[in-house]
Amino acid sequence: MMGKRVLLLISVLAFSAAFATTGDCRWKKKVRPIPSPLLVPQLELGKEVNASKAVFPSRLVELYDTISITFIGDVMQHGKQLRDALIEGADPKLAESYQYEYTFKYIEETLLESDLAVANMEFPVGLPPYSGYPLFSAPETIIHQAQKSGIDLFLLANNHLFDKGKKGFISTLNAYERAGAKYTGAYRTPQQQNLENPVMFNIKGIRVAFINFTYGTNGIPVPYPCTINLMDSVYVKETIAKARDMGSDIIVCLPHWGEEYMLTPSAQQKRWAAMLLREGADIIIGSHPHVPQSAEYSSQKVLFYSLGNYISNQTTPDYTQLEMMVTIQIIKDSYTGETSLLPPHIEYLWCFKKDEFAPHYTVVPVEDIIGKKYEVTDSFQRSRMERTYRSFLDKGLVKENESLK
């Protein structure tokens, strides 16, 4: 009889542990499945179990914790995109006159299911009149839609952040803060930079640090006391060391770097990547080239030189409409504290302009179209998408490399 009671107790505890969550990740909308709890020796029907502490701990613990982080590339706002987002007859100077319901529509499910989703936002926000290239400015309603669709962390360290000067910079930070949106890479003062860089997330007990920095600001001086993380090797090394001292399990570096429209990384990118990995970065996700670039990964490190544009008005070269959305799963051994990375899940996306697929600019997973989940009535665009996608895959630019450490 005692054996049956112990079995019943163990079953209840095991069931509870299988559905428990840990950490303080309260910003996501869904709870992801937790791996099976630690198995107890000799747990077989009809067998007595020694329930002493030597065999059965006072509480069941997870053998592994697993989290997922999804990254998308450059979110752009060209002039034609702004005109498309403007509600007909509305005042173009008002942020509420713009709607972005299609911007993340076809990837929203992935973003919401991830424990954390990250996007590179390449424009100032909140300062009308809104404008596209070369000096960007977008309404803050795009932030609200991104949040609603599942984006949790916004990257601001890029070459366009000061397109509208100090006023545009302050307007941008104000807009993110009004929205309650977490951003990184740019700060009001050096003091804020020192306090908030790197930004750290505790997700189910796994501490992940993010370090975002840019090669420059298109020659526009950074007005004091405004601060942006620049591609300074001494500062970046110090920040990685700081992240390690803060107890991070995983360090993610997010450089805005490289040569535009090149499918392979520059010599400078390669040198920097080697340095970042050597200093302790576990994951590197780059931006700026506006096309996807080569990538390699192992069970310990992940390196994507560029994901490409997420959404933009660019069409040439062809690869400016193709992007990689990358989801990385991180596993932590609850006993040893060691972390490892599962092979990244890559979903290729295609950016469609207004009326090419939907009534507005949007982004759709390529395989959803090839697999006929969605139909593309524009035969030219479908053919171009398939040709570009196949061409990129045939180049073999994404590789597993277990020597990457």
Image: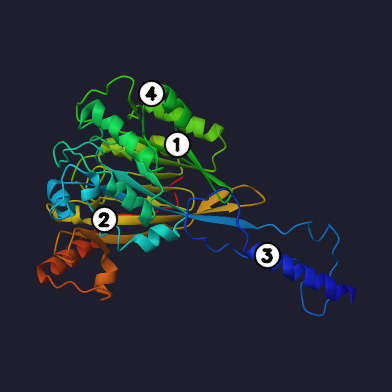
Name the image quarter holding the N terminus. bottom right
239 w.r.t. 365: above or below: above
Q: Secondary structure at mark 4?
A: loop
Dot 2 alpha-carbon crowd within 10 angstroms: few under 14, some 14 to 19, many 20 or more: many
Q: Amino acid at mark 2?
A: Glu
Quadrant in which residue 131 is drawn? top left
Instruction: Estimate the x, y position of residue 48 in percent, counting from the top left.
Output: 85, 74
Q: Which residue is mark 4?
A: 189
CA separation, marks 1 and 3? Answer: 41 Å
Q: Secondary structure at mark 1?
A: helix
| Mark linked to residue 127 | none
| Mark linked to residue 16 | 3
User: Are the residues flagged by discs 3 and 2 in contact, CB closer than 8 Å?
Assistant: no
| Mark linked to residue 278 | 1
Which mark's residue is nearer the viewer, 1 or 3?
3
Q: Amino acid at mark 4?
A: Thr
CA separation, marks 4 and 2? Answer: 34 Å
Residue 106 in view (yes/no): yes
User: Are the residues flagged by discs 1 and 4 in contact, CB closer than 8 Å?
Assistant: no
Q: Amino acid at mark 3?
A: Ser
Q: Looking at the picture, tell me which residue is in the foreground, 325 or 88.
A: 88
Instruction: Estimate the x, y position of residue 373 in percent, counting from the top left.
Output: 28, 75
Q: Secondary structure at mark 3?
A: helix
Dot 4 alpha-carbon crowd within 10 angstroms: few under 14, some 14 to 19, many 20 or more: few
Q: Which residue is mark 2?
A: 323
Q: Residue furthest top?
A: 224
